[in-house]
Amino acid sequence: MVASVMSDLLKLSDARPGDRGVIVQVGGHGSADEHGLELERRLLELGFVEGARVELLHEGLFGRDPIAMKVDDMCVALRRHEAALLTVRFEPAPVWKAAYVPEEAAA
């Protein structure tokens, strides 16, 4: 899990599979060029808005790119450089999940 404290704000591009959180900012990372503004607009159109819940589901085998995520009730794939425009407040992993070790793995 990327974040261990509820107040941790990180870019979505830094997330790992299973990480969950809420988008707190779209853009605003110095993307003042035309391409950055267009990408920010497209992310907003796809539903990456402040307050949307996200969960990273899968990442690519080579370079961990692209990443698949659940955004509220839909699945979307993004490149990590696109996900870097999104700031997320990640939730801590549930204690039972973090401490769970299957019996066959423990033996």
Image (cartoon, rainbow, N blue to C red):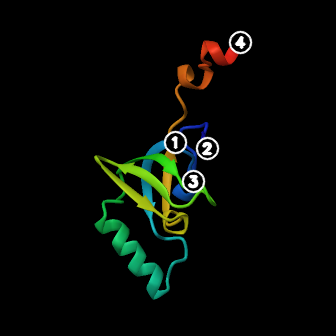
In the rendered structure, find residue 10 and report the number of the disc placed on it. Answer: 3
Three-letter amino acid code of the residue under disc 2? Val
Going from the N terminus, do you reach mark 2 or mark 4 first?
A: 2
Quarter placement of the N terminus: top right
Contact (Cβ within 8 Å) of mark 2 with mark 3: yes
Question: x, y percentage for residue 84?
Answer: 54, 64
**SS assignment at label 1:** loop
Q: Which residue is mark 2?
A: 2
- The residue at which mark 4 appears reads as 107
Question: Residues under labels 2 and 3: Cα distance?
Answer: 9 Å
Whether pointer 2 and pointer 1 mark residues with C-beta atoms closer than 8 Å, the reply is yes
Q: Is residue 41 above or below residue 20?
A: below
Measure the alpha-carbon separation of dots 4 and 3. Answer: 36 Å
Q: Residue extending furthest right? A: 107
**First-in-chain label (2 vs 1):** 2
Residue 6: x %, y % from top left: 53, 38
* Cα distance in 3D space between marks 1 and 4: 28 Å
